[in-house]
Image (cartoon, helix red, strand yellow):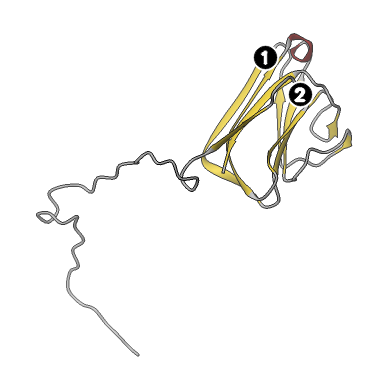
């Protein structure tokens, strides 16, 4: 079927043409579909599973104690349903945190999609080696 359109199309929000902008209001709701889920450690830790299935990462926060912040440390995010064991790893994201820094935070305007799961680890040995160091509070917002 062949179709054609000529002329001018006007899209308007139900008022006088082109005089009032469309207004969008984010309405608070209690349904899970529109809310983020905060996940936090209950004590200092070396890792945290933010989501044990596919999902989106919106924000991440890691607060180190004085033992961890005494040297450089790394925050790694893995596309996995569980945190990897100590040893060689290949993270999806890795953030180096300089000596003396006690807090790392990141928030994404457009969330990062993980196809398997979302786990976070804190390491003292760089981006490709998980060296467990249970000296951090870890939290994140996922959906």
Residue reaching furthest right?
A: 87
Q: Secondary structure at mark 2?
A: loop
Q: Residue at x 21, y 61 (%)?
A: 11
Q: Residue at x 87, y 36 (%)?
A: 85
Closer to viewer: mark 1 or mark 2: 2
Marks 1/2: CA–CA distance = 14 Å
Residue occupied by mark 1? 102
Front residue (pair 119, 72): 119
Measuring from the top left, give residue 41's x and y in whole percent.
69, 26
Front residue (pair 112, 32): 32
Q: Residue at x 68, y 14 (%)?
A: 101
Specify the quadrant of the image occupied by residue 30. top left
Measuring from the top left, give residue 89's x and y in whole percent.
84, 39
Q: Relative to residue 90, is residue 74 depicted above or below?
A: above
Residue reaching furthest left?
A: 16
Instruction: Give the mark nearest the N terminus, 1 or 2.
Output: 2
Q: Residue at x 58, y 29 (%)?
A: 106
Specify the quadrant of the image occupied by residue 127. top right
The circle on residue 90 is none
The circle on residue 45 is 2
Q: Is residue 123 left or right of residue 119?
A: right
Q: Quadrant of the C terminus?
A: top right
Q: Is residue 1 left or right of residue 56?
A: left
Question: Few, some or many C-alpha atoms within 10 Å of disc 1 (few <14, some 14-19, many ≥20)?
Answer: some
Measuring from the top left, give residue 50's x and y in whole percent.
67, 37
Q: Quadrant of the N terminus?
A: bottom left
Q: Is residue 136 left or right of residue 87?
A: left
Q: Secondary structure at mark 1?
A: loop
Q: Is residue 90 left or right of residue 62?
A: right
Q: Relative to residue 28, is residue 97 depicted above or below?
A: above
Measuring from the top left, give residue 46's x and y in whole percent.
78, 26
Q: Relative to residue 80, is residue 9 depicted above or below?
A: below
């Amino acid at each position: 079927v062949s179709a054609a359109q000529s002329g001018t199309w006007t899209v308007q929000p139900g008022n006088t043409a082109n005089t009032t902008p469309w207004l969008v209001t984010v309405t608070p709701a209690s349904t899970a579909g529109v809310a983020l889920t905060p996940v936090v450690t209950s004590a200092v830790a070396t890792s945290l599973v933010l989501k044990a299935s596919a999902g989106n990462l919106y924000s991440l926060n890691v607060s180190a104690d004085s033992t961890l912040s005494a040297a450089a440390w790394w925050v790694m995010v893995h596309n996995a349903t569980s945190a990897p064991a100590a040893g060689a790893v290949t993270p999806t994201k890795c953030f180096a945190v300089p000596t003396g820094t006690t807090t790392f935070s990141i928030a994404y305007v457009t969330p990062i999609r993980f196809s398997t799961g979302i786990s976070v680890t804190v390491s003292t040995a760089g981006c490709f080696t998980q060296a467990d160091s249970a000296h951090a509070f870890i939290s994140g917002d996922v959906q």
